[in-house]
Amino acid sequence: MTAEAEVLEELHRLRARMPRLTGALAAGVDGLVLAQDTPGVEAESLAALTAASLGVALRMADATGRGDLRELLVRGTHGYVATYAAGPSAVLTLLADDQVSVGRLHLEGRRSGARIGELVADVLTPVEARPAPEGRQPRPSARQQRLPTRPVPPPSAS
């Protein structure tokens, strides 16, 4: 079974466990859809919006000293959009109606995010972690980007 099929299977299991979910999407941090179960919602648009909101949320967490981003929750009049880190290179975005238990949403979202992170770890492994073919320097593809982290300052020369 491919990673995409396994991720889609995880999304289906998650939706079966939580009937109040109206959609689930796994995407790379670059906004590319990995797998989706989002009836009535344009998956590519949702993935792109997730990537954009992820960028803002990462900057907000960094600016306020809150550490690495773990999740993002948006509440609208008709329900919730929740995004969870799924390893360093992917995110899980869940759509839920306004009657969902937010605690359960977080519990299940975190669990599925961790599982999806494991499933896509090999597929979305950063290029710098892979050995380069002899005589070639690897170039990261859009699917191999990672969640941005706070830059580490270079060691001082003293």
Image (cartoon, rainbow, N blue to C red):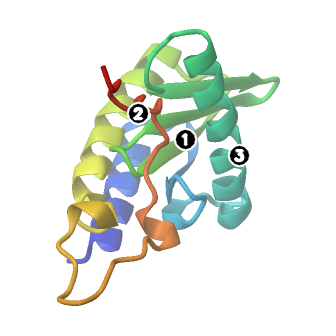
Q: Residue furthest right?
A: 77
Q: Residue at x 36, y 41 (%)?
A: 113
| Residue 125 can be seen, yes or no | no
The quadrant where residue 12 appears:
bottom left
Count of numbered tags:
3
Q: Residue at x 29, y 87 (%)?
A: 136
Q: Which residue is mark 3?
A: 52
| Residue 129 can be seen, yes or no | yes
Residue type for callout 2: Gly
Q: Residue furthest front?
A: 158
* Quarter of the picture holding the C terminus: top left
Across and down, in percent, residue 155 comes to 32, 28
Q: Residue furthest bottom?
A: 135
Residue type for callout 1: Leu
Asked which secondary structure carries label 2, the reply is: helix
Residue 56, placed above or below residue 30: above
Judge by depth and name the residue closer to the eye, 55 or 120.
55
Q: Which residue is mark 1?
A: 94
Which badge, 3 or 2, comes first in the chain's sequence?
3
Q: Is residue 130 left or right of residue 27?
A: left
